[in-house]
Amino acid sequence: MSALGYQELDFRQTPLGDLMLRRRRAPEIDEDIYEVKLGDAFLMTSLFHEAERQLARRGLAQSDHAELDIVVGGLGLGYTAAAALEDPRVTRVLVVEFLAAVIEWHERGLVPLGPELTADPRCRFLHADFFERVCDRSGFDPDNPARRFDAILLDIDHTPTHLLDQSSAPFYTESGLHGLRHHLKPGGIFAMWADGNPDPAFTQHLGRVFASAEAHTIRFNNPMAFDDRETGGESTGAVYVASTEPAR
């Protein structure tokens, strides 16, 4: 345990930089908080995760399919996948995660939602590059190249322009989005989380590729920031939702 009350649970060198999982006690809310750093940047925290949950809820709400076979791009601390599994229509969730350590955190129970996700027979982790799988015509599932999905939920980069790695930049173009649409069934949904307010330019890209597209602003209480800095207010996230069919 550090002098600041942090306990380092795991540290790895990765192609994207040094990756750290740590835990600290927040006496103000009487909870343990789990934080992930990549290099000098904070990636995620268990302190607030409403935008990640809303990604699943708002995305899946746009589907009228009776059963849902979905992809989640980016595992993180597991909040998007867990929220998706709350939908009773969901039969299978394939979570595509680039960093093997993040999958191991869940399998070893180092993060709060790990035991829940690994125990759910509908949920499967795949160690792979989401953006490379988009470009691969064989699809996301190496065991079933013909598999198409009812929904694809993405939570990897900070925004369409603030990226963890520049190699993902082509995905956010109209050409890249057309490649993703190939992996969806008729009536399929693509939904994506991003930090901050919606980007109108990206919503327009979606609208030119999909039959319908909209962006939602998600506001949520942020009681504390990383490193115990008080924020005293509200934070904002965006959830983009696009469909291969016109909006209902």
Image (cartoon, grey):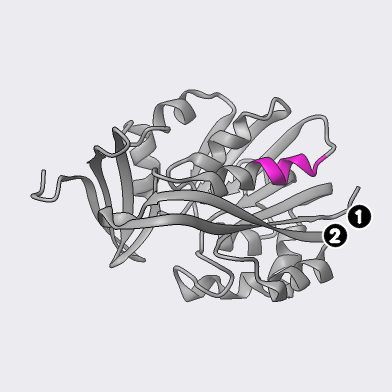
Classify residue 68 by image quadrant.
top right
Q: How many marks?
A: 2
Task: Indicate the quadrant containing the N terminus: top left, top right, bottom left or bottom right.
Answer: top left
Residue bearing the label numbered 2: 212
Label number found at residue 246: 1
| Local crowd size for mark 2, using a 10 Å CA cut-off: few (<14), some (14–19), many (≥20) | some
| Local crowd size for mark 1, using a 10 Å CA cut-off: few (<14), some (14–19), many (≥20) | few
Distance of label 1 from label 2 (alpha carbons): 5 Å
Q: Is residue 122 magenta?
A: no
- Going from N to C along the chain, the mark reached first, 1 or 2, is 2
Can I make out residue 147 in this image? no
Residue 165 coordinates in the image, percent (x, y): 45, 71
Disc 1 marks which amino acid?
Pro
Classify residue 69 by image quadrant.
top right
Badges 1 and 2: C-beta atoms under 8 Å apart?
yes
Q: Which residues are magenta?
A: 57-63
Residue 180 coordinates in the image, percent (x, y): 71, 60
The residue depicted at 58 percent of the width and 53 percent of the height is 219
Label number found at residue 113: none
Front-lying residue, 82 or 184: 82
Q: Is residue 59 magenta?
A: yes
* Horizontal side, residue 134 vs residue 7: left or right: right
Residue 227 coordinates in the image, percent (x, y): 26, 56
Instruction: Classify mark 2: helix, strand or loop.
Output: strand
* Horizontal side, residue 218 vs residue 248: left or right: left
